[in-house]
Amino acid sequence: MTRPDPVGLLDPATHAWLTRHALPGALVHETDPLPGGFTNDMVLLTAQPPDAPGAERYVLRRYRPSGSRVPRNTCAVEIAVLGRAAARTVPVTEVVAADPHGRATGRPTLLYRFVDGTPLSRVLADGLVSGEARALGRAVGAVLARIGRAELPRPGVFGDSSLEPAPDGAGPLDDLPGFVERCLVTAASDGPLSATDSAVLRDLARGGPRALAAVAGERSLVHGDFNPKNVLVRRRAGQWAVAAVLDWELAFSGSPLFDVGNMLRFAHEYPPAFAAGFVDGFRGGNGRLPGDWLRLSRTLDLFALADILTAPPDPAYFARARAVLHRSTVHRY
């Protein structure tokens, strides 16, 4: 049995845009909030277009104003990444319609088809035997290698939907010690980060210039948030496969080691064979891993870690990130 749209999930302007423009004449049966979106609002829609034999599922993504220190792509840029860069090499969601400037809905809005699959985070949390974990890791690593095959004109963040970074480089991602300092300065004085935590973060960030120099000039497509919550997986013919890579709002042009560090940030929480399989899959897909790739990838991941620690989305995620920070004092970057 279906239920009407909850007023809080679909305001009149968005409902009108959906049924008149995005899915003309469609009957929206059901809406449910989707968990996991730290920066944007996500709604699962069940709707029946007039020419469809049955109801279909879609995801409505509504962009919030960004106060993040990490550059976030606009709706228009994310559409370009999905349509022109990522879609050539990896499975992504199919964009159905967009209101990139929010002229109809009041906020930048993206509608794409729902993809059947299970978040990688859930599969890893459920536990896997060693062989299954390694096979899953290989599948994910191979997909990351394919993302890195997409090359851009130069390194840097995307200024607009042309996906051509500005000639002056990566901007906020070209100075790790400075970025960490800006994060610490803007962190809430009553936040959970202690003086010891701050000192450790500053100390680790000193390795930033050397790590950035090692990857200078690389201009591969980088997802920017390549972690288990943004990767959907499924079993296909008895084998693990990646169903879709979601949420490209942090994508930029640079080194795939940013994404390697992101995926392995919480590797100690996963079945050990997963990380080994991930590295095997990445290498097998012609992903480049220099001799000191682990140190480099962990150092590059400090951009994301510093942002999380100084503006945590929730206490549980902060605790996990803080544990990673202090583990790194033992396993030096």
Image (spheres, rainbow, N blue to C red):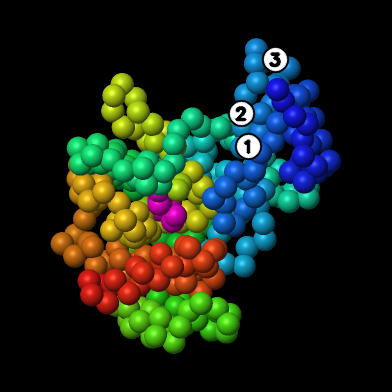
Instruction: Tell whether label 3 touches label 2 (CB within 8 Å).
Output: no
Q: Residue drawn at (78%, 31%), measured in percent from left and top?
A: 4
Dot 2 surroundings within 10 Å: few (below 14), some, or many (20 or more)? some
Circle 3 residue:
51
Which mark is in front, 2 or 3? 2
Residues at discs 2 and 1 in contact (Cβ within 8 Å): yes
Residue 106: x, y in percent? Answer: 78, 50
Where residue 73 appears, as percent x and y from the top left, is 56, 55
Q: Report helix, strand or loop for mark 3.
A: loop
Classify mark 1: helix, strand or loop.
strand
The magenta-colored residue range is 221-228
Report if residue 326 lies within the magenta region.
Answer: no
The residue wearing badge 1 is 44
Q: Is residue 20 visible?
A: yes
Q: What residue is shown at x 35% (from left), y 82% (from top)?
A: 200
On screen, residue 183 versus residue 273, left or right, reads right
